[in-house]
Amino acid sequence: MINIVAKRIWFLGASSIILLIGILSLAIPPHLNLGIDFLSGTGVTVQFEKNINSSQIDNQFKKIGLDSPNIQSMGNKTFFIRTEKLSDFDLENNDSQVSRSDLEKTIEEVDQNAEIIEIESVGTKIAEGTIMNSIIAVAVASLFVMFYVLYAFRRLEKSHRFAFSAVLTLIHDVILVTGIYALLGHIFGLQVNSVFIVALLTVIGYSVNDTIVIFDRIRENKIKFPDNNFASNINASINESIIRSIGTSLTTLLVLFSMLILGGASLREFIVVLILGVIVGTYSSIFIASQFLIIWEEGIKRN
């Protein structure tokens, strides 16, 4: 039997290091690489036939008055270009004199055989609403988790500790996933958009499910073996659940990696967040969540 509880300082230390790297990634401009869902503007995904570089696109856009576009290579001669709103989108406070047809002509001047895969435009009010709704969604999900655990473990002594430990684990997972994603945004240009929030909420559900499975085993063992000390009970419960948790996660990751490799670029950000969430959620449910319970009971010291 692996004595996971006795090594809690190592596991918490590893989480702290990764959290620090993630927080530093969030602190370095441009922080999170926000998409137009959060910033407003127009986003264009273009696949060129020629070998085009960012400066060529930038120069052509400046000729029609679209200054400082954000240009990101997505591989396979495909670029995502974020710029100000176009005049023919009915959006608030839009002073742009550049239309969609102007944009299309400019892209043709760069490469006549270029294919515009997608054009999307988001207004300022919609972007502000997306930010607020995202914060509310994560906060509401956290509250529901806490209330559910409080209800499920209501017959146990100090049941509130299970609820707060589950929420602390959830916060740990959200910060960790967001921080790592910010780092990947710096390296690979991954964007944060509304799909990211959907994926993050999915991650919350997955992580909490795994955590509650182990918490439920702790509850069962506490009833079966009331004379066992709390640390031994937790350690036994984790060991009894670890194969199930890792097996489920590996199966899920196999499907997600297949989708990442074989799926289109539009699914990339969503799948990456899910992969990060499954890995972080599995790690936290096994090595972190129950440690909060034991720290609450006995402190940070080793057994």
Image (tube, grey):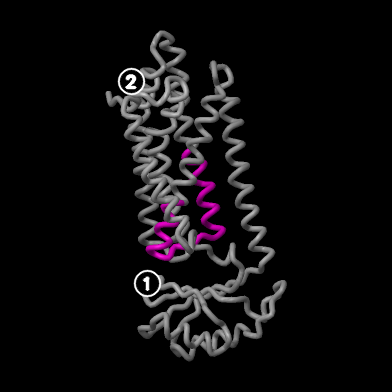
Q: Main secondary structure of the magenta part?
A: helix
Give residue 206's position: percent from left, percent from top: 48, 41
Residue at 61% in and 43% down: 139
Position of residue 116 relative to residue 300, above or below, is: below
Position of residue 173 relative to residue 64, above or below, is: above
Give residue 252's position: percent from left, percent from top: 39, 45
Q: Which SS class for mark 1? A: strand
Name the side, left or right, on which 230 lies relative to 42.
left
| Screen quadrant of the N terminus | top left
Residue found at the far left of this picture: 1
Q: Which SS class for mark 2? A: loop
Give residue 21's position: percent from left, percent from top: 39, 50
Residue at 52% in and 77% down: 69
Position of residue 194 relative to residue 99, above or below, is: above
Residue at 56% in and 24% down: 160
The residue indicated by pointer 2 is 303
Position of residue 141 relative to residue 195, above or below, is: above
The amino acid marked with disc number 1 is Gly
Name the side, left or right, on which 121 lies relative to 276.
right
Residue found at the far top of this picture: 227
Say how many tags the image has.
Answer: 2
Residue at 38% in and 35% down: 12
Q: Quadrant of residue 35?
A: bottom right
Query: Magenta part of the protein: which range?
Result: 179-207
Q: Is residue 69 magenta?
A: no
The nearer-to-camera label among 1 and 2 is 2
| Screen quadrant of the C terminus | top left
The amino acid marked with disc number 2 is Asn
The residue indicated by pointer 1 is 75
Name the side, left or right, on which 221 lies relative to 87.
left
